[in-house]
Amino acid sequence: MIKGLLSLAINLLILLVFVHAIGSWLPQVRESGFYRKLDALIEPLLRPIRNVLPTYGNIDFSPFVLLLILYLIKHFLRL
């Protein structure tokens, strides 16, 4: 039961990170209320990664690193 809920939470977070990353490319989406709420949820998870990982040009790799971390958590917890 706990594993199922944790797996669901991580899967939902993975989906939200994807939506956040794709939405960041579209100015119309970034200005929406939904994206602002999503940004308030995802940004605190991305900020520590951005503090450690430098950007290359205009490319932000922090969502990719966060997704990698989430997938590693799922793998090591065998979810």
Image (cartoon, rainbow, N blue to C red):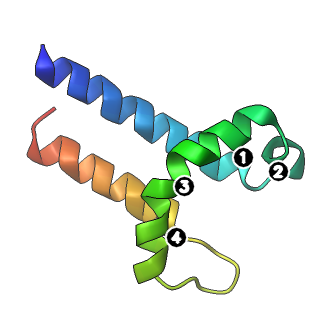
Q: Circle 2 is placed at which residue position? A: 26
Q: Depth check: give the residue in front, 68 or 44.
A: 44
Identify the residue at the far top of this view. 1
Q: Determine the image quadrant of residue 7.
A: top left
The residue that appears at 72% across and 46% down in the rendered structure is 23
- Residue 61: give its label: 4
Residue at mark 4 to residue at mark 1: CA–CA distance: 15 Å
Q: Circle 3 is placed at which residue position? A: 43
Foreground mark, 1 or 3, reads: 3
Q: Circle 1 is placed at which residue position? A: 23
Among the two numbered marks 3 and 2 on one chain, the one whose residue lies closer to the N terminus: 2
Identify the residue at the far right of this view. 28
Residue at mark 1 to residue at mark 3: CA–CA distance: 13 Å
Among the two numbered marks 4 and 2 on one chain, the one whose residue lies closer to the N terminus: 2
Kind of residue sitting beneath label 4: Phe
Among the two numbered marks 3 and 4 on one chain, the one whose residue lies closer to the N terminus: 3
Kind of residue sitting beneath label 3: Glu
Circles 1 and 2 in contact, beta carbons < 8 Å: yes
Disc 3 is placed on an element classified as: helix
| Image position, residue 3 (x, y; %) | 13, 24
